[in-house]
Structure formats: structure tokens, C-alpha cells
Amino acid sequence: MIATLASSFLPVHDPAAAAAWYRDRFGLEGTDVQEHAAVLRDRDGRLLTLMGPVSGIPVRPGLAWAPVSFRVEDVAAFREDLLRSGSPCSPVQGDPGTCLFVTAADPDGNTVLVVDR
């Protein structure tokens, strides 16, 4: 049996506000935004589910590790866009031959990883 990834989950304070941030920064489309959760889809159909407090999940927003990553063409340019938008992020790290990356914080304090491959 071969499985496919159904969704990544991320705890947030306000699913609608978090969905807007992920839409504006990463181009994700909100397919179902409700009080308890927001389901977002990337252009390839992969899902990110933002779970709010009324969902009942026992995890608080502000994850210090990156449970989700996003691939972009130019990490340095993307980092500059994040900084201009007020999103805190690390310097570009890694090795151009292997992988360049930055870590950023979403408005809920969750760590997000942005990679070039």
C-alpha cells in the first residue's frame, strides 16, 4: 500500500486571520475557512489545516520547530519579502549545493521553514 499525505496541521489562534497570512505570503488558497479550522491548498493540491482553539486540539500556537516547509525559487528574495511584510525570519542558511533555507515566524509564533529545493 502506498499512502499520500492528506494534510499538515498547525495550531493557530484565529484560523481566518492565519489563513489570510498564509494566502498572502505563500499563495495558498483557502478552501474551507471556519471558526474552528481553515483548510488551505497549494497549487499541487497539498493541504495545510490551521486548527484554532475551538477545534479542541490540545496544542498551543507558537511551535518552536517547523512542522511545515515551503519551497520557493529564490530563498533570499523571499526572505526580503518576509522582512518587508514585518515577518521575523532568520538569515539565509545552508549550502547552495544542497539546500538554502530560512526560518520564519507566522503571526501565531509558529516556526515555518522556507527552502529552495
Image (tube, grey):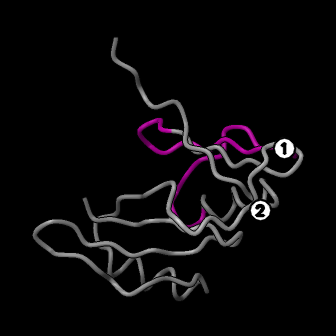
Query: Given the image, on which type of amino acid does mark 2 rest?
Result: Ala
| Location of residue 78 by image quarter | bottom left
Q: Residue at x 79, y 55 (%)?
A: 16
**Residue 108 horizontal/vertical position (percent):** 71, 69
- What residue range appears in magenta? 24-46
Q: Residue at x 68, y 68 (%)?
A: 62
The alpha-carbon separation of the residues under discs 1 and 2 comes to: 12 Å
Q: Secondary structure at mark 2?
A: helix
63 above or below 36? below
Residue that label 1 marks = 36
Q: Residue at x 59, y 65 (%)?
A: 24
Mark number displayed over residue 17: 2
48 above or below 109? above
Query: Given the image, on which type of amino acid does mark 1 rest?
Result: His
In the drawing, does residue 34 fall left or right of residue 67? right
**Residue 33 horizontal/vertical position (percent):** 77, 44
Q: Is residue 35 magenta?
A: yes
**Residue 82 horizontal/vertical position (percent):** 51, 80
| Location of residue 31 by image quarter | top right
